[in-house]
Structures are given as C-alpha cells and as structure tokens.
Image (tube, rainbow, N blue to C red):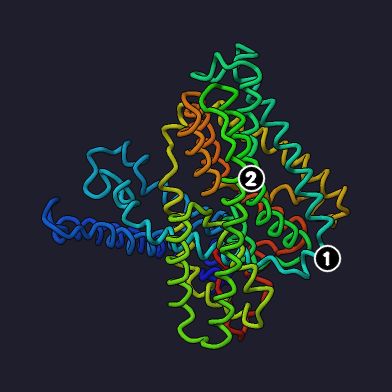
Amino acid sequence: MSRSGGVDDVDWSSRGPGAVLRQLGIIGLLVGALLLLHRFAVPPEGAGFDPTGLLAFGFVVLASYTIGELTMVVRLPHITGYLLAGVALGPSVAALFPYAPAPFDRGVLNPQVINQLGLMDTLAVGLIALSAGGELRLETLRSGLRAILGVLVGHFATVMLAMTLFILLISGVVPAIELPGFGGIDPLGAIALGAVVGAISFATSPAATLAILSESNAKGPMSRTVISTVVLKDVVVVVTFTIASVVASLAIGEGSADGNVLLVLAWHVLGSLGVGVGIGGLMVLYLRFVEKEVLLFLVGVVYVATYLSNAFHLDPVLLFLAAGFTVANFSAHGEAMIDSVQQLSMPVFVVFFTLAGARLHLEELAHLWPFALALVSVRAVAVFLGVGLGARMGKADPGTRRYGWMGFLSQAGVAITLSAKLGEDLGAPGRTLSTLLIAGVAINEMIGPVLLERGLVLSGEVGPRDQASSDTPPSTETPRTDTPG
C-alpha cells in the first residue's frame, strides 16, 4: 500500500486486462448488492430509521476506492478517480436518468445522503487541516522562507490583478462578452467584485495538494515550497475575502458601513489561530503524559473543536492548521500524531473527495461553460506568471521556477464555501458570480491534481508511474499511509 492507503504506483496496463476486468467486476458486484439491498432491505420512507446513509457510506468507500485504482490505467491520481466517482454517484448525473432503479434515480449521494454523511466530512476537514499544519515545520520555513514569500506575493498580485480585470470586462464594459445576469454594474462596483473573485481564485486546495504529494511520495524543494505556500495561503484568502466583501457590498449598495468589521475580522482570524494553538497545546500534553488511544482522542478533538468553532464563529480550517503546527513543532510526539492521522487517511480521502465530486453541479457548468473556461484559463495564466515571477524573486529552486505553478491550480472546499457566501451576501451580482465560480471550481478540481502530479514528475521529485512500478524493488518495510489533504 502507498502512503495514502492505496496500492503502490502500479502500472495496471502492464498487468494485462485481467486486473482491470477484476476491478470492473468488483464494481459490478457492489452495484448489484446495493440495488438488492435497496429493493429488499430498506424500509419505506417514514418507517423510522433510514439506513440509506450507511448503505451509501459503505458503497462509496469500496466502489470509489476501486474506481480510484482504475484511474491508474490512464496514469491519473487516485483522487481524480474519487472525484469522478462522486460526480457519477451524485444528483447531477442522476438527473439524466430519472427512471433508473433506486437509489440511482436520485443519486446514491443525493443531497439527503450528503447531509447524513456530514459528520464524516467534518472529520475529514479536521484531519486534513491537522496534517497540513503538521507539514509546516519551522526548520523548513526558515530555510525556504524567501522562496515561499516570493511565490506567495507574486502569485497573489497576478491573480488579484487578472481576476479584477476579467470581472470588469464581463460586467458589460465589453458588451460582446457580458456575463448574462451581470450587466448594469458600474466600473467601480465591478472592480470591487473582481477583488472578491480574486480572493476566491487565490485559494488552493490543501486537501488535493497533500493527497498528491503523499500518494506520489514526493520529496524535494518544490514539494516543500508548494505545500508550505498552500497552507499559508488559507490565512491570506480569509483576510482578503473578508475585506474585499465589505468593500464590494458598499460599492454595489448591498451593505452599510460597519465600524466593527476589523474587530470581526481580527476575531475570525486571530481568534481561530489562538484557539488552535491552545488546542494544540492540550494535544501536546495528552501525547506526552497519556499517549493512549490516540486515534480516538484525535476524532474527539476534531468534533469538539469543530463545535467550538461553529459556536464562537471561528474558522475551523485555520484552527486545525494552528493546532497541527503547534503539535508538530513544539512536541517530541508530533510525528506520532501525524502517523496516527495517517492511519485514518484512506477512508477519509475516499469519502472527502467522493462527496466533493457529488457536490459539483454539472448543470451550472453546462450553462456557463464558455465563461467558466475563460475564468479557469485566465486564472491559470495568472498563476503561471505569478508563481514563476515570485519564484525568481525568491531565488527558488529551478523545479519551482519552471513547474511550481502546477501545484496551485486545484480548488475544493474553501473556494466552494466562499463562493456560496458570495452568493448569499452580495445580492443578484453575487449569485451570478457564485454560480460562475463554482463552475470554475468544478474544472479546477479535476485538472489541478493531475497537473500537480505531472509537475512533480517534470521537476524530478517523483518518478513516472511506470518507472515506479517496474524499476523499484519490493520493499520489506511497512509503508506509511497517506497524509490526508
């Protein structure tokens, strides 16, 4: 097994069609079992306990994992398979087949089931952020701080500028490319909204980044620079989005001046980081003086801390990042915590990315695909220019200067959450842009992991899949599981 809980980088095509047929056969058996269980074992609606969420969970863990293995036939990362599985099992595809047998008529992962599996999603987010914070080591930050800051600043400047100009152009300044439902915004309002879109576009998925780095077992300066920058970006994204949203709401007449906005922002960011450090300190004490049932302890910490973050309006991602950073850097038991998190990573990866795929709205992509493709393209060019420029200013390694941009394209939870908030807070223009952004995230979520893996291969920090499977002798060591991303 790989560090992600999957098998090592095996070239399935070299093993002949029999291996692929066996995987397809497993999926067929799982589909048949699910159909039979829904036909004969699930009680009618209103009969009391509803087991569909549990059935979906078991099916997703097994079927999505198998589909993730099948993606290796075309040398794609496991998580691409999980995302595709989520799309296939979600409501968007189910809408195309309304007469399919239950549960495929509504989607195995329909909104009701996704809501039932929310606890698993909460666990996944917490473990992912803990792992991401644990990857931020002080010695790494000290040695690579110039390169990290260079990439962060260069990337931020080009993305904010490019997205602001893009939104200005589609706001009606150029009538031929006006976004439907977005016209009539004055230039100042469009620029303010462009800054909000820029903040969301600056976000990169720590989950996808960690998943690919761990699955490929990548090691090197580019890997360290990418993951460190991605984690630090979350703080920048939250601060920039909050400020830009307030300015945009005033510019388009959807809000009023609030003198407490800086206080709210300070509590949201600094409070989250402070509480996270405190929780990290408690974890350090537990690992030092108890160090028993660490897995159960981590699960409990995730749910209690998530409850606290919701109750006191904190950001759970920032909170867990700070907790993971504290444990990893100020405890001799930090590595033990990371290893414990990794033991839970395989089912967490499968469920997290499958649910992310199920939440993608293909109908929105179908309606706005020309604008969504333009958004993704402009963002990709801005990332390419900004990361390259920043890496040169920061005197980063040659791999980061050439291929580092490939590590910043994937998007998922944070971008989707902020896009939804944009739609809620900024009226009709916000709802239009929210739909556009979510359609863009759907594309970035699919292509980002693939490009990151390719960039790692080109930089020489990981070998191609066929070389990894044919040239590497079997190891006698017990492999580590994947760090959740």
Quadrant that contains the C terminus: bottom right
Which residue is nearer to you in this view: 291 or 401? 291
Query: Which residue is pictured at 58% across the width and 69% down the height?
Result: 278
Query: Which residue is pictured at 61% across the width and 15% down the height?
Result: 186
Q: Position of residue 361 (x, y in %)?
A: 43, 38
Residue of label 1? 143
Q: Position of residue 217 (x, y in %)?
A: 65, 68
Secondary structure found at label 1: helix
Mark 1 is on which residue type? Answer: Ser
Q: Considering only vertical position in the picture, is 88 above or below 483? A: above
Q: Considering only vertical position in the picture, is 29 above or below 170? A: below
Which residue is nearer to you in this view: 74 or 157? 157
In the picture, the disc for residue 455 is none
Asked if the residue under mark 2 is in contact with the one under mark 1, i.e. CB atoms within 8 Å, the reply is no
Specify which label sits upstream in the sequence, 1 or 2. Answer: 1
- The answer, for residue 69, to whether it is visible in the render is no
Left or right placement of residue 423 versus residue 75 in this view:
left
Left or right placement of residue 332 versus residue 80 in this view:
right
Q: Tag 1: Cα neighbours inside 10 Å, few (<14), some, or many (≥20)?
A: few
Secondary structure found at label 2: helix
Query: Which residue is pictured at 64% across the width and 14% down the height?
Result: 173
Which residue is nearer to you in this view: 217 or 13? 217
Q: Tag 2: Cα neighbours inside 10 Å, few (<14), some, or many (≥20)?
A: some
Left or right placement of residue 325 versus residue 362 in this view:
right
Mark 2 is on which residue type? Answer: Val
Task: Say which quarter of the image contains residue 123.
Answer: bottom left
Q: Position of residue 440 (x, y in %)?
A: 55, 36
In the picture, the disc for residue 239 is 2
- The answer, for residue 8, to whether it is visible in the render is yes
